[in-house]
Amino acid sequence: MTDDVASSVGPLVTGSEIARLAGVTRAAVSNWRRRYEDFPASAGGSANSPLYSLPEVQAWLDRQRKGQEVSPEVELWQMMRAAYGELMLAGLADVAGVLTGDDTATLPDDVLSRVRELTRTETPADVVNGLVERFLDSARRSNSDQVTSERLVRAVRHFTPELPSGAIVFDPACGIGSLLLSVAADNGTNCCGQELDTASARFAQFRADLSGRPGARIVAGDSLRSDQWPELKADLVVCDPPAGVTEWGREELLLDSRWELGTPSKAEGELAWLQHAYAHTAPGGQVFIVMPASVAYRKAGRRIRAELVRRGIVRQVVALPPGTATSHALPVHLWCLRRPMKTNADDTNHTVRMVDLTANDPDESLEPRPDQIADVPLIELLDDTVDLTPGNHTRVRLRDYPGEYAALRQELTEQIGRLAALLPQLSPGDGPGSLEGATTSVAELARAGLIEYEGAEPVSASDQLDTDYLQGFLRSSVNARRSTSASGTYRLDGRGSRVPRMGINDQRRYGSAFRALSEFDEGIRRVGELSRRLADIAREGLATGALTPEK
């Protein structure tokens, strides 16, 4: 649709926005479209996502007595949607620029008129904050990762320390400034930021100006390829970097001095951002950076993780609740790094605190319970994988090694004691093997109606035949050879298997012995399983310090 057509029908709204205007569900709007012939026709969009003229929709809702008064804020948002479309960030920056008095900012006449009307009753900062809320809500509903979610901002702010007056806070991927401006809420804090997207950087700067941060400076540019703050050393660096980006400039940055922990692989762009953030910390300064959960264990990043641990740089890893990030429900991690004080020999930490909040609600308390925390010695992390996944360490710490070891040891002792009692008393035989005498085939027993099948195993169907006797002989080596194919697969051969002929009393005597041997086999299997579990828990307990040898 051309701009001329768009201007002729006024601001455009989606079906979801009509539903919010009328206070109904999206399904109700779909029903109205089908049921009412006078429902406004589509004025743009596509067949699957039509757009409607806001004035026409309002008039129709009023006629049907389904409407409600549209607030000036909603009208401003709809006008901006009509004017800027997919370039809403540019629109937000223009509105904020006009409100700060920036000479380069211009707005369409209808948008400018609505903005001026709003500022008669609201402060410029409140107008911009209202637009930011609508933009964040739109990003959340579309599962966009264009901006840092409100939940993620809240989580980072919860774990970051209080800052002294005059502290420097830096965000090298600041977006529209939500994380930076929230963490550096104190007006005495100096804010610095960089953002690749020009419109986002411009809007973030205007937001800082409107919130009373005259010293804040946010610039546009690629932080990894073109760092605009080469000399900056901050007290706190916060960052929600782009995830999964492989074209981050590795080839042209191979010899960059920021890679003091190791040059990241092409697939580990997140670890490039981490080292960039760390390079901008002053001694004693901290980094709080959002990481995909996979960065904690991926093979390609093992060497860099090992250096982070070995040097005592990584202080804490927090697994945040699923749903904290906007674009997906998977959990993300918050890594806390600290640059040691060069002059303080006692400044090195000896553990990494692991916090696992993955079972928590992202909108509820972020304060971890004692069972969600594990302080892991550095030496335990420096293995072949250097896995920094919090859940893998908190679960180990919660395990009751002494209790499990004692219970398994007792069970194994009892099982071994029972094994000897299970063995039947057997005497020397006085003749050839039973299957070398008179025998009967399984096929003959079946034709006589003496057996039936439960799955693949034949069982007695008559008081003339003992089941344990039958199955015991069928599992003998002679019958096993008959039932084993050339490929080594065992399959009961009902035609070829045979059992000796004997009276029911002798059958029961043999059957009792075979039954005891079956129980013995099961006991041996159980002892083997218990032995493996006992050895595993003993090794893990000794290695983690949960168990210790007696003196």
Image (spheres, helix red, strand yellow):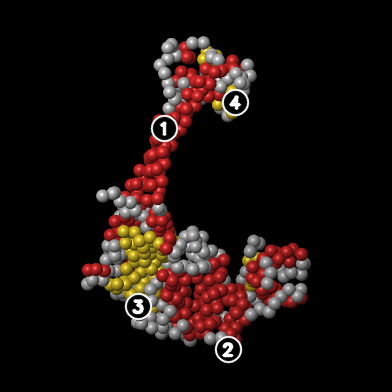
Cα gap from disc 3 to disc 1, whole angstroms: 71 Å
The residue tagged with tag 4: helix, strand or loop? Answer: strand
In this figure, which residue is indicated by the disc labeled 1?
419
The relative height of residue 310 versus residue 189 in the rendered view (above or below) is: above
Instruction: Give the class, few, some or many, for how many residues have Cα within 10 Å of label 2's Cα (few <14, many ≥20).
Output: few
Comparing labels 4 and 3, the label whose residue is closer to the camera: 4
Please report the residue visible at 36 percent of the width from the left and 71 percent of the height from the top. Answer: 237
Label 3 vs 1, first from the N-terminus: 3
Q: Nearer the viewer, residue 515 or 246?
A: 515
Comparing labels 3 and 2, the label whose residue is closer to the camera: 3
Which disc is residue 120 wearing? 2
Classify the position of the N terminus by image quarter.
bottom right
In this figure, which residue is indicated by the disc labeled 3?
168
- Is the C-beta separation of discs 3 and 1 under 8 Å? no
Label 2 vs 4, first from the N-terminus: 2
Label 2 vs 1, first from the N-terminus: 2
Q: Amino acid at mark 2?
A: Arg
